[in-house]
């Protein structure tokens, strides 16, 4: 998962880009980058591995000049962590184009061959984001105009939709021309647009999540629709057009379960409200299937499960308590690159409050269970803190299939639910009882007002919404994502970085 931002304004945008990336830091902690463009059409770039606060210092911010810019925070989806693959990416032909991308293309190899053999374009990394940029650049080049017009940009994006498969929410800027943003025809990855009226005119901001817009006194205009392209020229004029033939609103359901901040709105849906309804659905399932439960207290596993846990406790009529204190200087363990690092970080990240566990039957609530590594250690923490019984409820169904659209889920063999039923998963996790959300209930909780046509629920049911995923592709993804492969990649990347430094 990654985060993107783009701004066209009437004043310098460097600080607003920095702030917008910081607000979206939860979407990626591996690398960060900002590229700006001044009135003369000159680009200025700073990007590197690390958190936003570590990548950008005063000397870097001063150099990021201009009233237009884009930014990106990365978490890698194939185990690569070289600074060369941090974004934004840039090509100088045609015009000078920079791009930042959230998602994952599923036909990268085919596109790479086409770019090399037919389009005669050079790729410098293995990143699918660089592939996306070069496809866009090639399609823009076919217009043969000195200054592209909105219709040229929309035509180029329409061709991108025809060539590129998978998930992509992208923001790009063309030197001296303007900024464009677009989503894939299924709208798998999120993107919203906001505006702010100033004395000099209207400023526009594009971001992955609405919280980046709200927090900077911009007004949320709307989501960018699946298949749509939005273009803001360097004079601040707004243009938009649907560029896909048959768009279907089908966002990734895991955004609502885990990734997005609760104070965000996505495709007309409140993340916080959807998570509260997940808690209600879990409470209904417990009441239906376990009416004589002996739960004494409901405790969330911070942070993303709080909304669901609080509503679950209310609906069950059971006391809610905070039982774990989180060290906020430790990153999200889900997106850490290796199993060893994840295991080490869990005990550093959470510490139990013993008084909330001693002698009680505790229901722990988590947003989801993927590898189970974190859950196993937290369950043991609860027991060590004196819990009499430990139950665990997941606001999401069992994760049994890989996500191929931009979430770095592990190899399926590393899922705790792989080839196990619920009882065997409970035994593996060390809990007295395990309750999973039903998929139909999860969908109903999020899509209460039917804002969405359907969701991509592939990590739960193996139904890939784009229809182009086969066993060969899953085998390829598996080879990239298992922890052994990642450790090998990390060693190779370290060698590359040392070579570059030398």
Image (cartoon, rainbow, N blue to C red):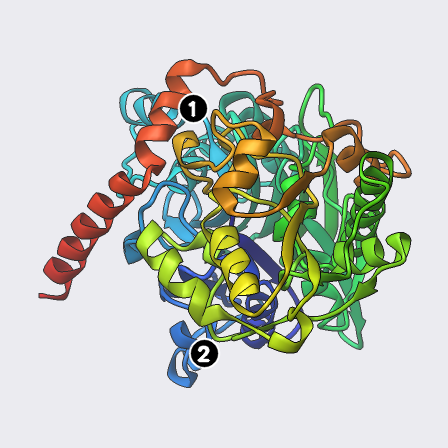
Nearest the eye: 36 or 451: 451
Nearest the eye: 442 or 151: 442
| Residue that numbered label 2 is attached to | 61
Q: Is residue 218 left or right of residue 231?
A: right
Nearest the eye: 308 or 237: 308
Nearest the eye: 404 or 34: 404
Label placed on residue 226: none
Q: Nearer the viewer, mark 1 or mark 2?
A: 1
Give residue 314's position: percent from left, percent from top. Answer: 88, 58
Q: Residue at x 80, y 77 (%)?
A: 199
Q: Is residue 44 visible?
A: no
* SS assignment at label 2: helix
User: Mark 1 and 2 residues: CB-CB less than 8 Å, in contact?
Assistant: no
Give the crowd class for mark 2: few <14, some 14-19, many >=20 residues within 10 Å: some
Q: Residue furthest bottom?
A: 58
* Vertical comparison of 375 with 480: above or below: below
Which mark sits nearer the N-terminus, 1 or 2?
2
* Vertical comparison of 142 with 129: above or below: above
Q: Is residue 205 left or right of residue 443?
A: left
| Residue that numbered label 1 is attached to | 107
Q: Is residue 197 visible?
A: yes
Q: Residue at x 59, y 58 (%)?
A: 6
Quick one: quadrant of the C terminus?
bottom left
Question: How much space separates mark 1 and mark 2, taking CA atoms?
Answer: 36 Å
Give residue 328's position: percent from left, percent from top. Answer: 53, 74
* SS assignment at label 1: loop
Give residue 42's position: percent from left, percent from top. Answer: 43, 63
Q: Is residue 181 left or right of residue 192?
A: left
Task: Give the quadrant of residue 214.
Answer: bottom right
């Amino acid at each position: 998962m990654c985060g993107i931002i783009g701004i066209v304004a009437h004043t310098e945008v460097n600080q607003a880009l920095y702030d917008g990336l910081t607000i979206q830091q939860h979407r990626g902690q591996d690398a960060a980058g900002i590229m700006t463009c001044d009135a003369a059409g000159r680009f200025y770039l700073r990007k590197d591995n690390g958190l936003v606060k570590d990548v950008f210092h005063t000397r870097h911010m001063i150099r990021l000049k201009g009233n237009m810019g884009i930014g990106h925070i990365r978490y890698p989806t194939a185990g690569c962590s070289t600074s060369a693959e941090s974004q934004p990416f840039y090509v100088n032909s045609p015009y000078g184009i920079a791009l930042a991308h959230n998602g994952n293309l599923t036909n990268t190899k085919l596109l790479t061959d086409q770019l090399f053999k037919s389009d005669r374009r050079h790729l410098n990394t293995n990143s699918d984001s660089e592939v996306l940029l070069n496809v866009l650049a090639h399609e823009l080049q076919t217009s043969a105009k000195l200054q592209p017009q909105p219709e040229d940009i929309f035509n180029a994006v329409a061709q991108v939709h025809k060539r590129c498969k998978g998930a992509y929410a992208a923001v790009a800027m063309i030197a001296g021309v303007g900024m464009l943003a677009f989503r894939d025809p299924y709208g798998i990855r999120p993107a919203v647009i906001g505006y702010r009226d100033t004395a000099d005119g209207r400023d526009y901001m594009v971001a992955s999540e609405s919280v980046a817009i709200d927090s900077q006194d911009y007004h949320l205009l709307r989501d960018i629709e699946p298949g749509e392209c939005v273009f803001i020229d360097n004079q601040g004029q707004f243009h938009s057009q649907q560029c896909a033939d048959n768009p279907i609103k089908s966002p990734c359901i895991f955004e609502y379960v885990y990734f997005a901040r609760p104070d965000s709105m996505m495709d007309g849906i409140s993340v916080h409200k959807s998570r509260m309804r997940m808690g209600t659905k879990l409470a209904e399932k417990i009441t239906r299937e376990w009416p004589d439960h002996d739960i004494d207290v409901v405790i969330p596993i911070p942070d993303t499960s709080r909304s669901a846990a609080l509503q679950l406790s209310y609906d069950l009529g059971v006391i809610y308590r905070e039982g774990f204190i989180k060290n906020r200087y430790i990153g999200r363990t889900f997106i850490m690159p290796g199993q060893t690092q994840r295991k080490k970080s869990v005990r550093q990240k959470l510490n139990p409050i013993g008084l909330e566990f001693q002698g009680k039957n505790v229901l722990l609530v988590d947003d989801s269970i993927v590898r189970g590594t974190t859950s196993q250690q937290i369950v043991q923490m609860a027991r060590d803190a004196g819990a009499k019984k430990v139950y665990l409820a997941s606001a999401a169904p069992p994760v049994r299939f890989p996500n191929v659209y931009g979430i770095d889920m592990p190899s399926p063999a590393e899922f705790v639910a792989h080839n196990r039923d619920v009882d065997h998963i409970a035994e593996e996790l060390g809990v007295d009882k395990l309750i999973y959300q039903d998929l139909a209930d999860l969908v109903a909780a999020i899509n209460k007002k039917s804002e969405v046509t359907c969701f991509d629920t592939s990590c739960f049911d193996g139904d890939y919404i784009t229809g182009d995923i086969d066993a060969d592709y899953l085998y390829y993804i598996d080879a990239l994502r298992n922890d052994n492969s990642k450790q090998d990649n990390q060693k190779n990347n370290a060698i590359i970085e040392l070579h570059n430094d030398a």
